[in-house]
Image: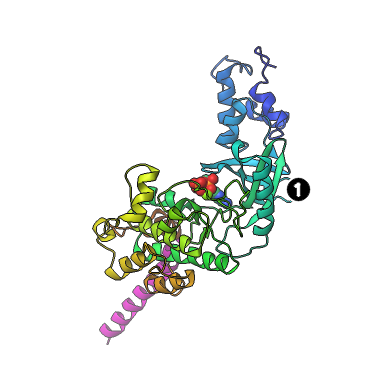
């Protein structure tokens, strides 16, 4: 123990099971100390140095090091080992984790305390059971729900990459074809859910996960409300969860009767955000935004992104029609309407951004990665062509 009675970084590392004493000793032995200086394992600076060294040699990641330096020793929730922190959302903290026995990498979502009431947990458990029956490649699969002490958590498939909100924040508005591909994949997931009688209720860019090769998956299905009949004793009954930026007028007016039309409107707003980088009604409070969805027309997206065609803006407007009867009626119809904007038969596999039309980091990276291969294949071809050219010149010049 340290002088303050709190376990030291080193003790935490061993207690947590993340490292063995031998690994720590070896890491310390590998550290270069200035002449005549002896490592002082108890002092804070050397803890930090040792932690940095352990990160450098790949035995810890920065998140684990920070947790250990803060004196934390528990990295498990039920049978899952937390490996990294992925994000903090409306629902709580999300971790990348590994199943201790099976080794499977998953995402673990910890429910915040105010959502961990016995009723909320009971309804989550019921729903996770229903969600676990769903199986669609464009839907983030729900795998498990568990409890560890008074902490409740959900386990889903882990999707590498970034969510659509992060993607647009980092790369700017997406090109039409890229946005059409991503949104059309989400519409496929919605078509499947709607056919099972399930309305998502919280379709938004942060709930669309995009892999580095452009595959999109819809997450958090069923987490923002009861799945089927709106059980009046459900704590989420009639409540709007999270942001008002993607809320349909019909959901604002009657939050007790979910319909697939809600999701289509929210998906329209998600598409608007993807190609403009702006939500349809950026200013004001949540109440102002909810009112704007009911009464105002959003700024013409072509003014924000001149590369959008009128036809594309029309699809968006049809998804975002205020009156459900005027709106595109089904998710299948969204897929069909967007199909003419896809880059290829299966849609774009890479992220292209707009308005510059520049290739995204993903594509640049792929090109950079493939340059050596291209050079390796092209060099012999160019050499052979040069030799043949030279040979025919010689043949022509010789008598
Ligand atoms: N299954 C998953 N795989 C990978 N990343 C995820 C997964 N689920 C959530 N995330 C990441 O964690 C962030 C927070 O998730 P969430 O709690 O659902 O937030 P939000 O309320 O914004 O939807 C997401 O925006 C996403 O980047
Ligand atoms: Mg989410």
Let me know if residue 96 is in the magenta part.
no
Q: Quadrant of residue 316?
A: bottom left
For the image, the number of numbered tags is 1
Q: Residue at x 27, y 63 (%)?
A: 307
Q: Position of residue 333 (x, y in %)?
A: 45, 73
Kindly tell me whether residue 27 is visible in this rendering.
yes
Q: Is 374 displayed left or right of 55 in the figure?
A: left
Q: Position of residue 229 (x, y in %)?
A: 61, 59
State the extent of the magenta-drawn residues as a range. 372-399
Q: Residues within 10 Å of mark 1 (few under 14, many from 20)?
A: few
From this view, report whether residue 78 is shown above or below residue 173. Answer: above
Looking at the image, the residue that sits furthest to the top is 3
Quadrant of the image containing the N terminus: top right
In-front residue for pair 88/124: 124
Q: Position of residue 165 (x, y in %)?
A: 43, 50
From this view, report whether residue 307 is shown above or below residue 100. Answer: below
In-front residue for pair 12/92: 92
Let me know if residue 375 is in the magenta part.
yes
């Amino acid at each position: 123990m340290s002088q303050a009675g709190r376990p030291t970084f080193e003790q935490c590392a061993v207690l947590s099971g993340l490292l063995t004493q031998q690994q720590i000793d070896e890491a310390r032995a590998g550290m270069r100390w200035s002449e005549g200086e002896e490592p002082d394992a108890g002092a804070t600076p050397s803890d930090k140095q040792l932690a940095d060294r352990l990160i450098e040699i790949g035995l810890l990641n920065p998140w684990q090091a920070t947790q250990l330096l803060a004196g934390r020793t528990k990295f498990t929730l039920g049978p899952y080992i937390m490996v990294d922190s992925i994000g903090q959302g409306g629902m709580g903290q999300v971790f990348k984790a590994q199943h201790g026995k099976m080794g499977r990498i998953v995402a673990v979502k910890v429910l915040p305390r105010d959502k961990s009431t016995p009723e909320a947990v009971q309804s989550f458990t019921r729903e996770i059971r229903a969600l676990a029956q769903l199986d669609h490649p464009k839907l983030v699969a729900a795998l498990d729900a568990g409890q560890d002490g008074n902490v409740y958590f959900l386990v889903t498939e882990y999707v590498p990459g970034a969510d659509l909100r992060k993607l647009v924040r980092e790369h700017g508005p997406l090109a039409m074809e890229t946005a059409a591909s991503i949104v059309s994949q989400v519409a496929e997931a919605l078509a499947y859910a709607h056919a099972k009688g399930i309305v998502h209720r919280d379709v938004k860019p942060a709930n669309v996960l995009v892999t580095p090769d452009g595959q999109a998956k819809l997450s958090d299905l069923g987490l923002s409300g009861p799945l089927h009949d709106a059980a009046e004793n459900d704590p989420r009954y009639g409540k709007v969860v999270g942001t008002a930026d993607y809320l349909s007028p019909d959901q604002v007016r009657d939050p007790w009767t979910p319909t697939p039309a809600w999701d289509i409107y929210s998906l329209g707003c998600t598409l608007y955000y993807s190609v403009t980088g702006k939500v349809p009604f950026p200013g004001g409070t949540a109440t102002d935004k909810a009112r704007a969805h009911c009464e105002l027309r959003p700024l013409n997206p072509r003014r924000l992104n001149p590369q959008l065609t009128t036809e594309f803006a029309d699809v968006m407007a049809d998804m975002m029609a205020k009156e459900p009867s005027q709106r595109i009626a089904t998710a299948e119809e969204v897929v069909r309407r967007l199909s003419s904007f896809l880059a290829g038969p299966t849609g774009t596999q890479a992220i292209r951004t707009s308005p510059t039309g520049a290739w995204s980091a993903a594509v640049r990276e792929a090109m950079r990665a493939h340059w050596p291969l291209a050079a390796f294949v092209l060099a012999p071809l160019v050499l052979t062509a040069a030799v043949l050219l030279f040979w025919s010149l010689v043949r022509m010049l010789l008598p």
